[in-house]
Amino acid sequence: MNYLAHIYLSGENELVTIGNFIADGIKGKSYKNYATDIQIGILLHRNIDTFTDAHQVVRQSTRRLHEKYGHYSGIIVDILYDHFLAKNWHLYHDSPLHIYTEAFYDTLEKHYDILPLRIQKMMPYMMTDNWLLSYASIDGISRVLDGMNRRTKQRSSMNEAVNELETFYDEFEQEFSEFFEELKLFSNERLKEHTFRLKKNAS
């Protein structure tokens, strides 16, 4: 899953959310260098990624893209699923998306000193262009895919995937909705397990 989904699935604990958000850059057992709540977020992120990659509904979405985009298909699906989460945000959270995203950016600024350098460098761009809110529109997703294509030095053609999004919009949305309900339940269980185990070990 992409940024918005990982943040949402973290629940209301700020440090768990920070851990989930920074987890891609935390390798191996180095997560143990962080506070307990951040560790919980990092481990939850890894669980979410494993569950997502193995899920048959996600693989169905990925297969639709694989012939053209190859191993980038999974990355594209993560981004497309964030679009459907943002677009249908009112179904998943009581707070409007623009308020939720601003609160998250405030959380990043509040905990700036503990963020990895990579995240610190990314923050100004993320906040200025309000990436999380932009996911709700096709234009916003198109800009994200353009940026991802530039990062691969134009090799991925990910910028063209907005065409598949528009062509198979209903199919992708249905697959997201079906998968995300299961992912929410899975994430809640893993969050409870990690919280119980790590808090117990820390006491």
Image (cartoon, helix red, strand yellow):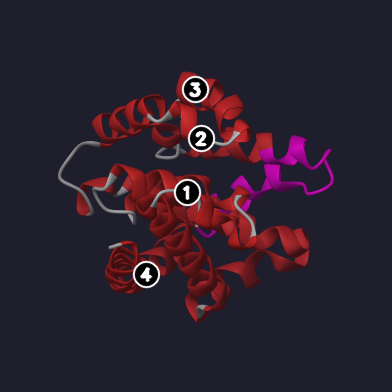
- Viewer-nearest of labels 2 and 3? 2
Q: Of the residues under marks 1 and 3, which one precedes in the sequence? A: 1
Q: Is residue 72 magenta?
A: no
Who comes first in sequence, dot 3 or dot 4? 3
Read off the residue under disc 4.
183
Magenta region: which residues? 148-168
Q: Is residue 29 left or right of residue 133?
A: right
Neighbours of disc 1 within 10 Å: few (<14), some (14-19), many (20+): few
**CB within 8 Å, label 1 to label 3:** no
Residue 23 visible in the shown view: yes
* Quadrant of the rendering where the C terminus is positioned: bottom left
**Circle 3 is placed at which residue position?**
129
Please tell me which residue lies in front, 139 or 29.
29
Question: Going by the picture, which residue comes out furthest to the left?
Answer: 94
Coordinates of residue 102 in the picture (x, y in percent): 31, 27
**Residue 145 sits in quarter:** top right
Query: Residue 53, percent across and down?
Result: 57, 72
Q: Which mark is residue 115?
A: 2
For the question of whether residue 85 can be seen, the reply is no
- CB-based contact (under 8 Å), mark 1 and mark 2: no
- Dot 2 or dot 3, earlier in sequence: 2
Amino acid tagged 2? Leu
What residue lies at 49% left-to-right and 22% top-to-bottom? 129
Q: Nearer the viewer, mark 1 or mark 2?
A: 1
Residue 168 lies, with reference to residue 140, above or below; the image says below
Q: Which residue is mark 1?
A: 34
Q: Main secondary structure of the magenta part?
A: helix
User: Depth check: 131 or 30 in front?
Assistant: 30
Alpha carbon distance from label 3 to label 4: 28 Å
Spatial CA distance of label 1 from label 3 is 29 Å
Tell me the kind of residue under disc 3. Asp
Earlier-in-chain disc, 1 versus 2: 1
